[in-house]
Each structure stands twice: as structure tokens, then as C-alpha cells.
Image (cartoon, rainbow, N blue to C red):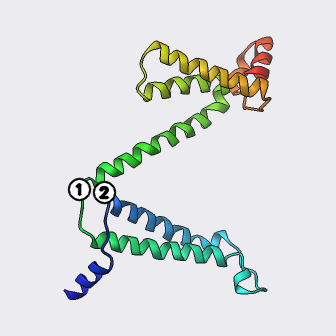
Amino acid sequence: MSRVKTLQSLFKRYRRPGDIVFAWVFLIGAVFLLSEIFDQTAYKSRGKLAAQPRFWPAVSLGAMTLFAAFHLLGSALSERIDGRWREVLHWVKSIEYAGWFIVYAAVVPYAGYLPTTIIFAVLLALRSGYRSAKMLGAAAVSSFVVVVLFKTLLKVNLPAGRIYEVLPDGVRQIMLTYF
């Protein structure tokens, strides 16, 4: 029992809600990356150890795994705090916006840059809590201005979208060039 108390005093620290979940996720990620080191890096039969392409990534991933294990041990030996799942839910909510961007990037090649940008700007305004016609109109107009700025003035080559293929020839050329 004294050994556990010694470990507890050695790893005593102030915890935050969700710390144990973060420690597990980080350790699992570190072990996964370390397990992939042989498939993702090369070994050259000649040369010094420190000059090997695999050496420094392996050192950094080994240290990351070691410190992740220490973090998990410290989290496991610390007293529990309420609010773990509320904190994890907050992290998941933050990831939602990355999901919005991934869906946006997946839809652009099909619907085109202009319609997708306007639709997603309005949807994100709604998601953020804006409900008035004035604010939704501002989101649509500002996204339209961004598209015109990028395509026309800055000459950025952006995906046209497959939906433009069904437009009449004259309109299709305008949409491909300016929107």
C-alpha cells in the first residue's frame, strides 16, 4: 500500500475534467503511430544510426508514447473530478466545424463553388443561431462577394462543379469564368 501512496505522491498533479479520456486517446494515437513506423519510413543499410530516415521519427514517437503513458498513469492515480463527459462533449462539438468543412469540400466538385459557398454560409449562420432574414441575407451576400473576389479579381482557379454542365452554353461559360 505504501508503494501506491508513493506513486500517488510522485504523480500528484491538478487534473481537469476529461483528462483521463484525453490521456487514453493520446496514448492510443501514439502507440498507433509508433506501430506504423516500419511501414512509413525507410532503413538504409549504410550510414550512421542518427542519419537513418527512420531514427528521429522513431525517437520522437517513442518519447511521445512514453510521456503519454506517464500522463495516463498520472491521470489514473489522481482523484476523479466531475464533468468528464461534459468536457468530452465540448471537444466533440468543436470537431463539428471540421465536419462542416469536409462536407463543404466534398460538395464543391458537384454543386460548384458559388452555390455551395452560399448554401453553406447560410447553413452555418443558421447553425450559429442567426435566424433573421437580415443576417441570413448578409451571409448570402458576403459569400457571393467572396466568390466574385476570388474568381474574378484574384483569378483563383476554383472548381466549377458538375452542375454547371447542364446549363445552357452562354450561361455555362459565364458561370465557369466568373462564378
Q: Earlier in the sequence, mark 1 or mark 2?
A: 2
How many residues crowd around disc 2 within 10 Å: few (fewer than 14), some, or many (20 or more)? some
Residue at the image position 46 percent from the left and 74 percent from the top: 67
Near-viewer residue (15 or 121): 15
Where residue 11 appears, as percent x and y from the top left, is 33, 76
Left or right, 89 with respect to 95, comes to left
- Residue 136 screen position, x and y as percent: 50, 18
Please, which residue is most extreme toward the left here?
1
Instruction: Classify mark 1: residues with Cα within 10 Å, few (<14), some (14-19) or many (20+).
Output: few
Q: Amino acid at mark 1?
A: Asp
Which image quarter holds the N terminus? bottom left
Total marks placed: 2
| Image quadrant in which you'd find residue 55 | bottom right
Q: Is residue 112 left or right of residue 2?
A: right
Q: Residue at x 44, y 24 (%)?
A: 126
- Which residue sits at x=61%, y=23%? 143
Where is residue 99? Give x, y as percent: 51, 41
Image height check: is 55 above or below 107? below
What is the secondary structure assignment of the residue under circle 2? loop
Which amino acid type is marked by label 2?
A: Pro
Task: Look at 31% across and 63% down and name the residue there.
Answer: 15
Asked if labels 2 and 1 touch by Cβ distance under 8 angstroms, the answer is yes
User: Between 11 and 136, which is closer to the camera in this rendering?
Assistant: 11
Q: Pointer 2: what residue?
A: 17
Q: Which residue is mark 1?
A: 82
